[in-house]
Image: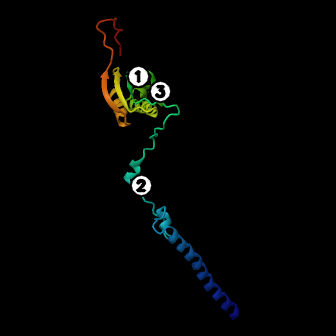
Amino acid sequence: MADETKKKAPAKKEAKPAAEKEAKPAEKAATKEGAAEKPATPAAAAAPGETPVVAAPTAAELLGEDANAKKIVKAKHAKNVVSGVANILATFNNTLVSITDMHGNIIGWSSAGRVGFKGSRKSTAYAAQQVAQDAARQAMAHGMKEVEIRVKGPGSGRESAIRALQAIGLEISAIKDVTPVPHNGCRPRKKRRV
């Protein structure tokens, strides 16, 4: 029995150095390959047996890319129109934005329904912002850089659509209000009873 215990004890001692020998070449290889590199995640840097600590993303990482932002990709058959006219029709129930070249040929258009809004949400300022961004992306895919804005109608999306066109990167050369005003022409419709 003494022989058996003596044989088992050295076997245990040999097992530990073998595991250490296997770990050391792996560590050496890692330090040679990525000496300047940091571990990919903080969880990789944690020692075995400890709970990994996950760092929160920084503000720069969060603000770096917008999850909803779509990149502007050049259209297959791009028209290469540099300047044009953005027509914004803001009614009480909807907002439509159509971007044309200087001759009036449509390059890109969008409406609140096309963007995905339904019912009373179509008339909101946020819907108008999304509509203007969608139409601007289409036009910028054809090379549009500068627009003249013509606004028509009394809706709530007038201002926000203009701001969205400016924010997406289009240069605004002029803003005109082309809302039709009658000079006592037609008889007005009957008053709305609420």
Residue beneath disc 3: 113
Q: Between tags 1 and 2, which lies in front? A: 2
Residue kind at label 2, given as amino acid type:
Pro
User: Which secondary structure, mark 3?
Assistant: helix
Horizontal arrangement in the rendering, residue 160 relative to residue 37 (left or right) = left
Q: Mark 2 points at which residue?
A: 57
Report, in whole angstroms, how far the alpha carbon at label 1 lies from the one at label 2: 40 Å
Instruction: Specify how the rendered protein is coloured.
Output: rainbow
The front one of 54 and 109 is 109
Q: Rounded to the nearest whole Å, what is the CA distance between mark 3 and mark 2?
A: 35 Å
Categorize mark 2 by other alpha carbons within 10 Å: few (<14), some (14-19), many (20+).
few
Determine the CA span between mark 3 and mark 1: 11 Å
Q: Looking at the image, which is closer to me, 129 or 50?
A: 129
Is 56 placed left or right of 21 in the picture?
left
As drawn, the label of residue 93 is 1
The image position of residue 192, as x and y in percent, is 35, 13
Marks 3/1 in contact by CB < 8 Å: the verdict is no
Q: Where is residue 32 in the image (x, y as percent from the top left)?
A: 51, 71
Q: Where is the C terminus found, in terms of image quarters? A: top left
- Quarter of the view holding residue 23: bottom right
Task: Give the tally of numbered discs.
Answer: 3
Amino acid under disc 1: Asn
Query: 117 or 144: nearer the eye?
Result: 144
Sequence-wise first label, 1 or 2: 2
Q: Which amino acid does label 3 sit on?
A: Gly
**Residue at the limit of the structure toward the left, as seen here:** 183
**Circles 1 and 2: CB atoms closer than 8 Å:** no
Residue 172 locus on image (x, y percent): 33, 30
Q: Residue at horizontal 41%, vertical 55%?
A: 57
